[in-house]
Image (tube, rainbow, N blue to C red):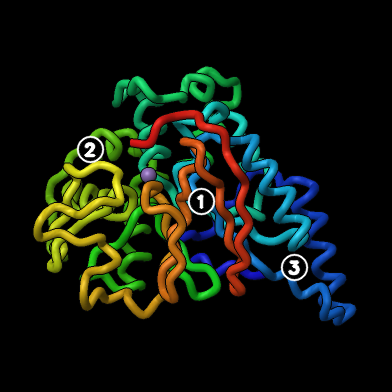
Amino acid sequence: MKFHNISRPSFSVAPSVQTSAGTNRARLRHYNSGDASKLNDMHHFVIGDLQGCAAELDQLLGRIDAASPGAGLIFVGDLVNRGPRSLQTLRRLKQLGSRVQLVLGNHDLHLLAVSQGLRASARSDTLDEILQASDRRELLDWLRQQPLALQVDGYLVVHAGVLPQWTVAQVLSLSDEVSTALRGDDWTHFLRTMYGNTPGRWDDRLTGADRLRCIVNALTRLRFCTADGEMEFATKEGPGAPPPGYLPWFDVPERKTANTPIIFGHWSTLGLITRDKLIGLDSGCVWGGKLSAMRLPDRLLLQVDCPQHQAPG
Ligand SMILES: [Mn+2]
């Protein structure tokens, strides 16, 4: 199995777990034996926002392994928060080692900022368990190595959205710029300057904190923007009409990534979206919807029903 993760260099996840190593060995055997029936080992499943729903994750992983044993697992971010078991969720993902790829969401960045004392916990946060965990340091260091965008099987994966004037190559390169800051020694400084809604519009000439903030806001928070890419953050979740003059980012005409299929999460009230060039996978697990996983390239959909842990919003 080959991941096409351009945005992520040679970060190696902690000692690879046995299941993962065993899977790789099994895969090699299948290739060597030329057994065509085992080709589904090459599948990836892309999985929607978990938000600390570890029990539902385990249930889903069981179904994924029944459908495609050892398939690669790609998560669209917002791994933690609001749900009941954020610590268990992070530990499980880290433990799955090289089988997992993910992009960071706004809640994951929020966890990092809260952990450094840069943000207060919100009332609906469920992050304390992680902050008090004995392996907190390892989990947070693992988390901040993760990218904000990646490519798999020809799909671009981001948590929230992309701006209309960005090409796929640019999205990956801009994600790398943020990752360099987040992985670096000065990552706390980066997080301190990350918050805010301005600049609301991308400009190639942006530099420093303004540039990184604009990238983070687009990739991890964007829902609506104007036809020329002015972002809007006042409107909260809701499938209703966009504010006047704004569109869902994916419907902006002449978006430069329009010919590349994009997978995203973040917008649970839209529900599952499956278009030719667009897959939205946040089907509201944390508020009693479903946790969704879609297999690439054939788009087989697996869903787990979720009890309601939080109200939407
Ligand atoms: Mn989100």
Q: Identify residue for label 1.
A: 48
Circle 3 — which element? helix
Please identify the quadrant where the C terminus is shown: top left
The picture quadrant for ligand 1 comes to top left
Picture coordinates of residue 217, whole percent (x, y): 26, 49
- Residue located 42% across and 58% down the image: 264
| C-alpha separation, residue under disc 2 versus residue under disc 3 | 41 Å
CB under 8 Å between callouts 3 and 1?
no
Q: Amino acid at mark 2?
A: Tyr
Amino acid at dot 1: Gly
**Crowd rating for badge 1 (residues with CA inside 10 Å; few <14, some 14–19, many 20+):** many
Q: Say few, some or many: other residues with alpha carbon within 10 Å of mark 3 (under 14 / 14 to 19 / 20 or more).
A: many
Q: CA distance from mark 3 to mark 1?
A: 21 Å
Label whose residue precedes the other's in the sequence (2 or 3) = 3
Q: Which residue is mark 2?
A: 195
Residue drawn 22% across and 55% down?
224
Q: Residue at x 22, y 38 (%)?
A: 195
Q: Is mark 1 within 8 Å of ligand 1?
A: no
**Residue for badge 3:** 41
Q: Which mark is in front, 2 or 3?
A: 3
The CB of the residue at mark 2 lies under 8 Å from ligand 1: no
Q: Amino acid at mark 3?
A: Asp
Label 1 – label 2 distance at C-alpha = 24 Å
- Going from N to C along the chain, the mark reached first, 3 or 1, is 3
| Labels 2 & 3 near each other (Cβ < 8 A) | no
Q: Quadrant of the N terminus?
A: bottom right
